[in-house]
Amino acid sequence: MSVSQAHGTLGRASEGNIFDMKVHNVLVVDDDDSTRGMLLVVLRMAGFATHAAASGEEAISRLTATHYSAVVLDVMLPGIGGIEVIRHMESMGRHHKCVVLISAGTESLLREVPDALVYAKLRKPFEIQDVIEAVRACVESLGTEEVPFDNDPDKGRRE
């Protein structure tokens, strides 16, 4: 689904007054530029503040500096992979929940990570609306309407 096709879907998914909505930070971690870029655009259109990481190393750096309501994470990353990123989150005591993007044959890797940190698993290729709904449900599962404290060092400068 293209970004323009997703726009029509977003209108139905984003009900209510946008000014009444609280903005939640979402980290998108994918080494594929086009996938990462598309996810950033559609999640912004859905009302989330988005940040990007192209590698596991960059994801860990961002997770150390900023609290995220959700993380969209590709399992297969060069260098530090998605599983290691989740383990790092657990070791930091950060309980961000992940919407994990998996390729064929990689789901078994998720057996090694705590279920509490994986909110949803979406197989590539995924439907845009499924990602939006999974992130929205992930944020709602936090059990609070309050936005986490935003200590974002890139405030005002989005990817």
Image: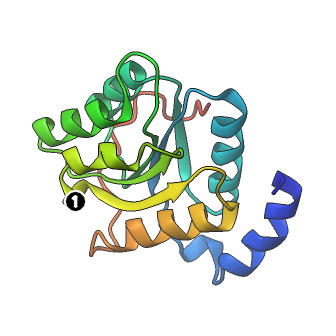
Outermost residue, right direction? 4
Q: Where is residue 135 in the image (x, y as percent from the top left)?
A: 49, 62
Q: Which residue in the structure is indicated by mark 1? A: 115
Residue at disc 1, secondary structure: helix
- Mark 1 packing: few (<14 Cα in 10 Å), some, or many (20+)? few
Give coordinates of residue 65: x percent, y percent.
30, 29
The residue lying at 49 percent from left, 67 percent from top is 134
Of 108 and 24, nearer the camera is 108
Vertical side of 141 occupied by 97: above or below: above
The relative height of residue 39 versus residue 35 in the rendered view (above or below) is: below
Q: In the figure, is residue 6 to the left or right of 78?
A: right
Count of number-bearing discs: 1
- Looking at the rendering, which quadrant does residue 17 occupy? bottom right
Q: Foreground residue, 123 or 71?
A: 123
Please provide percent x and percent y for residue 104.
53, 46
Horizontal and vertical percent for residue 124?
60, 50
Q: Residue at the location (53% across, 72% down)?
A: 21
Residue found at the very far top of the displayed protein? 79
User: Looking at the image, which is closer to me, 14 or 146?
Assistant: 14
Residue nearest the observer in this picture, 2 or 75 = 75
* Residue 135 sits above or below residue 56 on the image: below
Q: Residue at x 86, y 62 (%)?
A: 5
Q: What residue type is labelled 1?
A: Asp
Q: How is the image coloured?
A: rainbow
Q: Residue at x 55, y 71 (%)?
A: 133
**Quadrant including the N terminus:** bottom right
105 lies above or below 145: above
Instruction: Specify the quadrant of the image occupied by residue 38.
Output: top right
| Left or right, 133 with reference to 127 | left
Q: Residue furthest bottom?
A: 16
